[in-house]
Amino acid sequence: MARAIRVILLGPPGAGKGTQGKLLQEQFGVCQISTGDILRKAVAEQTPLGREASQYIQRGALVPDSVIVNLVAERLKDKDCEKGFILDGFPRTIPQAESLEVILKTRNLALDGVLSLRLPHNVIVERLAGRRTCKNCGALKHVAFDPPTKQGICDRCGGELYQREDDREETIATRLKVYDTQTAPLEDFYRERGLLREIDGVGKVEDIRNRIDQVIGDRGQ
Ligand code: AP5
């Protein structure tokens, strides 16, 4: 049986958090909570959350902490998170990280580690500009590094692949700035707690997967 893990995937836009998060989810059978995916679904469905979030996402800014913290706190109560979780895109600010500490403490849970994917800005821009996401199942592809068999069609489910609105050049620049000012300080936050594990995020998906394996131990068998 796969063992439980509770980890945070930290890293700039396009670092590969979603890609590696999905692999870890399959491997360990725990839930992957991508706040970005949850927000984009809400935007597509035009829920009150989606209407509020879309104005921030479109310009590359962060959605207010209170909105995000409530959303994650609720999601963590779901049955598929009982065995553990991969947090992808949360926390993203010091107040979010402090709130997460309270949530976990209340439930007597501890983090196994914070995996910080590191890579230079030029690689990030290349990855984001070529990213395509499935509208139906959320699978991630890349026009150059992992192209679909049929252009514009998801290999996994046959759904339509689309380019995210916030992957435009000017919005990418804002997101990178927001990351440097508001999210990068989390590295020190978790370093001080002995939880930070730095991972070289440059290379093939499988290479990075192996680096993560070395850091988190066995393959969960
Ligand atoms: P979110 O969806 O979380 O975006 P992000 O953090 O900017 O990260 P991305 O999804 O862009 O990248 P990723 O690291 O997952 O990379 P991926 O695996 O896709 O957030 C979007 C917005 O929502 C935010 O701007 C904000 O407004 C809001 N939001 C979300 N969470 C929030 C929070 N906590 N607080 C406040 N606001 C919040 O990879 C990218 C591409 O590269 C893909 O095409 C992939 O196929 C390819 N790729 C991946 N790995 C490799 C590799 N090793 N080699 C080659 N290609 C690769």
Image (cartoon, rainbow, N blue to C red):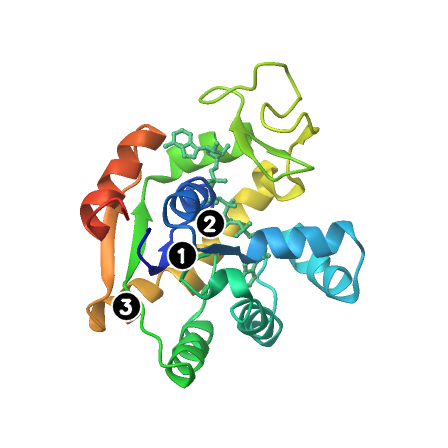
- Mark 2 or 3, closer to the camera: 3
Which residue carries the number 2 mark?
Answer: 176
Residue 18 locus on image (x, y percent): 47, 44
How many other residues sit within 10 Å of disc 2, few (<14), some (14-19) or many (≥20)?
some
Residue occupying the point 31% across, 68% down: 111
Q: Amino acid at mark 1?
A: Asp
In this figure, which residue is indicated by the disc labeled 3? 190
Tell me residue 99's x, y (percent): 45, 79
Secondary structure type for disc 1: helix
Q: Residue at x 64, y 29 (%)?
A: 157
Q: Amino acid at mark 2?
A: Leu
Do the CB atoms of the residues marked 3 and 1 lie less than 8 Å apart?
Answer: no
Of residue 8 and residue 220, the one placed in the foreground of this image is 220
Disc 2 vs disc 1: Cβ atoms closer than 8 Å?
A: yes
* Depth order, front residue of 51/141: 141
- CB of mark 3 near ligand 1 (< 8 Å): no
Residue that protrudes farthest toward the front in the picture? 1
Q: Quadrant of residue 131?
A: top right
Q: Is residue 88 left or right of residue 2?
A: right
| Circle nearer the N terminus (3, 1) | 1
Q: Quadrant of residue 66?
A: bottom right
Q: Which residue was labeled with disc 1? A: 180
Q: Give the vertical position of 57 relative to 135 (above or below).
A: below
Above or below residue 177? Residue 69 is below
Q: Could you say whether the residue bearing mark 3 is in a helix, strand or loop?
A: helix
Q: Residues within 10 Å of mark 1 (few under 14, many from 20)?
A: few
SS for callout 2 = helix
Q: Is residue 50 left or right of residue 131?
A: right
- Marks 3 and 1 sit apart, C-alpha to C-alpha, by 16 Å
Labels in figure, total: 3
Instruction: Give the mark toward the camera: 3 or 1.
Output: 3
Q: Position of residue 101 (x, y in %)?
A: 38, 78
